Image: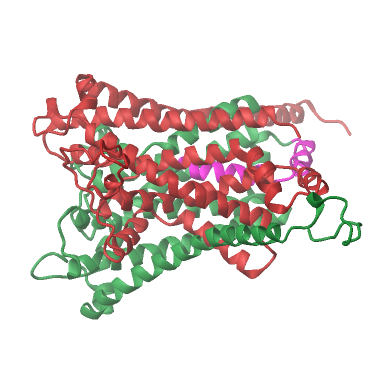
Chain colours: A green, B red
Amino acid sequence: MSSPLAVSAARPVSDRLAKRASRHVKERIIEAILFASAAISVFVTLAIVYVLLKESFVFFSQVPVIDFLTDTQWTPLFDDAHFGIMVLLSGTAVSSFVALLVAIPIGTIIAIYLSEFSTPHAREIAKPILEVLSGIPTVVFGFFALLFVTPILQWFLPPLPGFSLLSAGIVMGIMIIPIVSSISEDAMRAVPMSLREGSYAMGATRLQTALKVVLPAAISGIAAAYILGIARAVGETMILAIAAGMQPNLVWNPMEPAATITSFIVQVALGDLPHGSVGYNTIFAAGLTLMIFTLMFNLLGFWLQRRYRERY
Amino acid sequence: MSLSAEEVATIRANIARRKTRDLIFSGIGILCLAIALLTIAALFADMIITGWDRFRPGFFTDFPSRRAAQAGILSAWVGSVLVMIVTAVVAVPLGVATGIWLEEYAPKHWVTDVIEININNLAGVPSIIYGLLALGLFVYTFGLGQSVQTAGLTLALLILPVVIVATREAIRSIPQMIREAAYGLGATKWQTVKDHIVPYSLPGILTGVIIGLSRAIGETAPIITIGALTFIAFLPPSPITDAAPFISVEWLKAPFTVMPIQIFNWTSRPDAAFHQNAAAAGAILVAMTVTMNAVAIWLRYRLRKNIKW
């Protein structure tokens, strides 16, 4: 913005129009402040990586990596300490699997319905309701899972214990429905109208068009929705800490209670662990494992999302 | 080419079958939406019915107690309000400044790409990881303690991506001609931003801030991780004192509890009487977040309707 006015510098029209150096300096200072703010987000990521790596390094200097990956027991706070992350991973995997069994079918059907079947008016009403569902605090969902959903499930499945991965997983799935449905719906609505029109011209019904034309065309966006849903399920904490119990069991049966990576961190944080003890470092090693998994899922999800955006 | 009556009948039956399937799917779609709606209704009804006995004025003005019927949420809601103040004071300027830089100033450069990808990733980091960051960095490295300021800072980092994305979307919807008109009158870049871009994108930014805060107020995991106490029977020191300079920041360093922690604590007790407290507090928390979300959605709706460039 430094183009000079077409007035000779010797006789300015007015002092108020003369170029002021202070203006330029002020602009640069403000730009620097704005850039510094933007750079802080990068420092947050670096700080997360630094903290997790630093404390995990202390942990792995006392616990061999091989034991961490292969041991089948997780008893970090006992005298006879075992650190088998598989135990916590099994809880995370089973609960996430249950959640996805709920969220993927329901979320996909809602997305197809809203994108291909419903009137715009119905969509205007349905989307805010789904947003409200995703805005409910997870601690409240945990309460709901433990004291509402579990008793109902016990009525159908009497052997179900008071704490179970099944009940926590189902509620977690309902919480994830809006993530799956909104990203999938965005992907389907990005499919050009001409493809639908072609399909209708051939005499296809709405369902045939949706399943055989729109769905395949939007598949990478829908895959992104599923993967971001998985990332959310893996990182979910409070529902599992409340409704799944916190016993570290190596289980593949959702009818049993188990600890997950996230609920273990909560369990340790609730106790009074001295800073610098092995128990304290354990939660950072668990956190690092969690971070690696969610980062992988998130990067894959973003990559898929970007791909469908570029196609049309 | 003519079709026999039989062939016509087959085709008609085929079409009828496909149309029935279409209708059935419509039904399934509405059913799935109903599941989402029913869950919200069941959750809210369950909270209100279970916690009904606890809704009394004293619930808001009493400290937690060993006797469930007399326990209240005073320290919890005061803590939540204080933490939200810190969160908003940190997250809003930082998020808005980042959004402005990315939309108005950022050059096409790898540094910009790094910052953009990084913000996308931060949005997907599980909240409990922010808790570990706060525990390792704020509590033990910076020595901020297990206090209101640590919790506020942690939640501010957590909602930063929400505020940034909302700011960017709001700024992006302002047409280029507004900027050109400002430059045409000799305004500098900053004058354009502060007098035009920011005021016009304010409703959009506000929507993002409200949604971010509604998320922060319900967050439990990172607050537990930094080691918030679950039983607090006192209030942080008042921000207003009777001696000069009349304003105190001691409350920033005070131990605290927040609504979700109180709910978690009551839920995890074996005594069912405390579950009623948890339900009542849960109903209040849900009502708060739903109200905040509703305000944000309404703001966005109004925004779309009223502004036509």
| Nearer the observer, B135 or B129 | B135
Q: Position of residue A23 (x, y in %)?
A: 70, 57
Is residue B93 highlighted in magenta? no
Q: In this view, does A227 lie above or below A47?
A: above
Q: Main secondary structure of the magenta part?
A: helix
| Nearer the observer, A252 or A298 | A298
Q: Is residue A51 left or right of residue A11?
A: left
| Nearer the observer, A134 or A119 | A134
Q: Give the range drawn in magenta.
A: A177-203
Q: Position of residue A213 (x, y in %)?
A: 69, 45
Occupied quadrant, residue B303: top right
Please report the residue visible at 14 percent of the width from the left and 39 percent of the height from the top.
Answer: B269
Q: Where is residue A28 in the image (x, y as percent from the top left)?
A: 65, 62
Q: In this view, does B192 lie to the left or right of B221?
A: right
In the displayed orientation, state which residue is furthest to the front. Answer: A11
Residue B33 in sight in this render: no
Occupied quadrant, residue B114: bottom right
Is residue A188 highlighted in magenta? yes
Q: Quadrant of the N terminus of chain B?
A: top right
Q: Is residue A170 above or below residue A219?
A: above
Q: In this view, does A191 lie above or below B104?
A: above
Residue A99 in sight in this render: yes
Please report the residue visible at 77 percent of the width from the left and 45 percent of the height from the top.
Answer: B182
Q: In this view, does A163 lie to the left or right of B190?
A: left
Q: Position of residue A56 (x, y in %)?
A: 30, 72
